[in-house]
Image: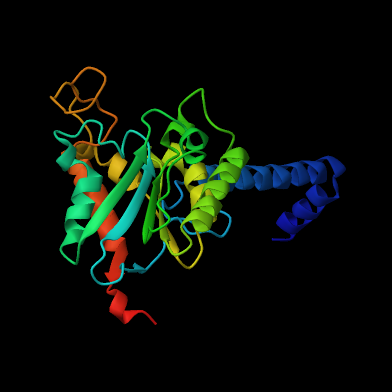
């Protein structure tokens, strides 16, 4: 036992052994830190994680007041090819007519649609017609701003989206606003959806994501099916199919509750 203790003391007194022990300790620290960094970087973040404090989907339905009795409730839709119903079997199979048909069960509801296929946010939002009598405005823009190799710079996208929301509030001051996220996978949509959520976070507005619907492969395709609107008369694997459009409709109608005008106040 004394021999072992003496040997250990001797080793500790050797400066080279001490230096070796220090290097070994430093190596273990670096390896441990590297492993922790790799774990955090490789871990996929939750899809509903907030961006800049703004949640990617709000809880609770948006309360919207219907038009006074005897007048139809007006909903303005501003969008791109998805709002035009690209790749649906018929126009009635796309999300806008399906949404209006659902809301009609609670009273007459009309859609005012201004959508331009293939265009970016600024190209549509700057000139889109907004009915001043709208009780609700649905914005479906941004998907074309996430095109590979032609992306809109995120801070500029936020500025443009904020300008459109302010324009809606100015031209249709009584309207609630629904802002749909981009029709892209979450890996590409995340930053842009965060900008939309940040611009659409007031009491009378809601951001509704579409990434989970897009990522469901049953919501798109198959390519080559006959459709009412496309470049060549057949559907692709990008735009929603009838099931995808139904899911978008369901997302909206689940998130908006119309109240009779008689309940105002």
> At 30% across and 71% down in the image, what residue appears?
68
95 left or right of 123 in image: left
In the rendered image, residue 102, in percent from the top left (x then y), is placed at: 18, 58
In the rendered image, residue 176, in percent from the top left (x then y), is placed at: 41, 62
> At 22% across and 53% down in the image, what residue appears?
100
Residue with the most extreme front position: 70
Residue 107 can be seen in this image? yes
Quarter occupied by the N terminus = bottom right
Vertical side of 80 occupied by 198: above or below: below
In the rendered image, residue 57, in percent from the top left (x then y), is placed at: 41, 58
Q: Which of 113 and 138 is in front in this view?
A: 113
In the rendered image, residue 112, in percent from the top left (x then y), is placed at: 32, 47
Q: Nearer the viewer, residue 215 or 12?
A: 215
Q: Quadrant of residue 31?
A: top right
Vertical side of 40 occupied by 183: above or below: above
Residue 50 can be seen in this image? no
């Amino acid at each position: 036992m004394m021999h072992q203790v003496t040997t250990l003391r001797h080793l500790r007194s050797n400066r080279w052994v001490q230096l070796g022990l220090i290097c070994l300790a430093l190596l273990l620290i670096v390896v441990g830190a590297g492993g922790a960094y790799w774990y955090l970087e490789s871990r996929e973040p939750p899809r509903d994680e907030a961006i800049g404090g703004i949640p990617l989907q709000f809880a609770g339905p948006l309360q919207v007041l219907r038009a006074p009795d005897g007048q139809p409730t007006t909903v303005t839709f501003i969008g791109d090819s998805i709002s035009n119903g690209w790749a649906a079997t018929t126009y009635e199979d796309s999300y806008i007519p399906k949404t209006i048909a659902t809301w009609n069960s609670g009273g007459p509801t009309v859609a005012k649609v201004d959508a331009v296929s293939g265009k970016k946010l600024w190209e549509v939002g700057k000139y889109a017609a907004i009915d001043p009598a709208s009780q609700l405005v649905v914005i479906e823009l941004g998907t074309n701003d996430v095109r590979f190799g032609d992306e809109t710079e995120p801070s500029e996208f936020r500025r443009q989206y904020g300008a459109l929301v302010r324009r809606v509030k100015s031209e249709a001051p009584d309207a609630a606003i629904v802002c749909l996220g981009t029709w892209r996978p979450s890996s590409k949509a995340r930053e842009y959806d965060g900008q939309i959520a940040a611009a659409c976070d007031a009491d009378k507005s809601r951001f509704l994501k579409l990434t989970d619907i897009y990522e469901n492969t049953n919501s798109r395709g198959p390519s080559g099916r006959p459709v009412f609107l496309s470049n060549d008369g057949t559907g692709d694997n990008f735009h929603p199919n009838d099931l995808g459009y139904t899911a978008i409709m369901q997302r909206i109608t689940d998130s908006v509750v119309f109240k009779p005008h008689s309940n105002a106040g």
